[in-house]
Image: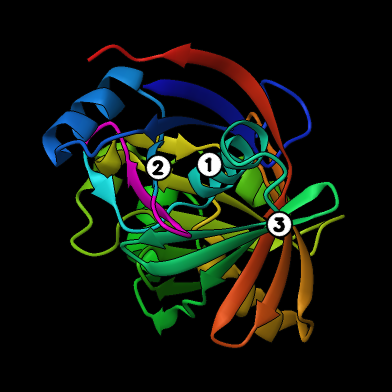
Amino acid sequence: MKYYVVDAFTEEVFGGNPAGVCVLTESLSQEKMQKIASENNLSETAFVQQKDGYYDLKWFTPVSEIDLCGHATLATAFVISNFVELDAQRMEFHTLSGKLVVEKKKDLLEMDFPSRMPQKRGELDMMAEILGVMPKEVYLSRDWVVLLESEEEVRGLTPDFTKMRELKEGLGVIVTAKGNTADFVSRCFYPEMGVPEDPVTGSAHSNLIPFWAQKLGKEELLAYQLSARGGVLYCKNCGERVKISGKAVLYMIGEILV
C-alpha cells in the first residue's frame, strides 16, 4: 500500500505533528492495522479507503485504535487532495466519531468536528501532584482539561507520567491557558496511549474551542500548541460542531509491504 508521512498544522517540515497515512485498496484486519501503526511508531497512523462518494477512515496510536484524531485527519485530507482525488475540495470521512467533513479553504484544510464541552471537576490537588503546578480549574470530557494561570506555566511543565498513567478516568491530559499572542495555548499528554506528549492535537480542540469560546466570549479563535515542534490551529465555535483549520506539508512517500 502507498504510505505517506505528513506534518500537520504547520507550513514547514519538522514542525507540527507527523501522521502516517496508509491508502488502502482493500480492507485490512484491525490486528494488521495495529501492527502497522506500532511499526510506524508515530503518534497516529491513519488508514483510509475510498468508497462510493466517501472514505472510510480509522486512526491507530502505537498501542490502540482511537475514536477521534485531528492531525491524522488533516494529514489524510492533504494526501487525498494531492495524490488520490486530485484537487478535491470536499472530503467526507466515515469514522468511529461519525461523519467528518474536510474542505479546502484557499491554503487551509478545514475540519468539521464534534464539540465536546468539558464538565467541571474538583481534582485540583490530584492534578497538582501530576503537573507540579496548582491548576486554576479542572474539567473532564474524553480527556482531562486543566486550566493554568499563564502561557509560561503551560510552556514550562514537566509532568510526572508515572502518576498520569494512574488516572482512572480520561484518555489523556490537556493543559491550557490564555495565550500571550494567541487566544489560547495548550499542551497534550497521552502516556497511556504510548504518546507521552502529542506535538499538535486536533481532537483536543473539540474540547478547547467551546471551552475558550465561552471564557473569552468570541467564536473565532487562534490557538497555539506549545510542544517542541509547535503548531497553529485556526478555530471556530459552531454550536454542536467546531471548525478546526490548519496547513500541512509532505515529508515522505513510500510503500508498505505486508
| Mark 2–mark 3 distance (CA, rounded to whole Å) | 20 Å
Residue 165, image x and y in percent? 24, 45
Tell which circle, 1 or 2, labels the residue nearer the N-terminal end: 2
In magenta segment, residue 52: yes
Tell which circle, 1 or 3, labels the residue nearer the N-terminal end: 1
Q: Which residue is mark 1?
A: 76
Label 3's element?
Answer: strand
| Mark 1–mark 2 distance (CA, rounded to whole Å) | 7 Å
Q: Which residue is mark 3?
A: 245
Residue drawn 32% across the image and 38% down it: 61
Residue 67, image x and y in percent? 32, 58
**In the image, which is nearer the foreground, mark 1 or mark 3?**
1
Question: Which quadrant does the C terminus fall into?
Answer: top left
Residue 160, image x and y in percent? 36, 40
Q: Quadrant of residue 30?
A: top left
Q: Quadrant of residue 191?
A: top left
Residue drawn 77% across the image and 68% down it: 221
Range of magenta residues: 51-63
Q: Is residue 56 left or right of residue 136?
A: left
Q: Are marks 1 and 2 in contact (CB under 8 Å)?
A: yes
Label 2's element?
Answer: strand
In magenta segment, residue 185: no
Given residues 210 and 100, the one toward you in this image is 100
Q: Which residue is mark 2?
A: 48
Q: Is residue 136 visible?
A: no
Tell which circle, 2 or 3, labels the residue nearer the N-terminal end: 2
Callout 1, which amino acid?
Answer: Thr
Callout 2, which amino acid?
Answer: Val
**In the image, which is nearer the foreground, mark 2 or mark 3?**
2
Does 255 sit above or below residue 65? above
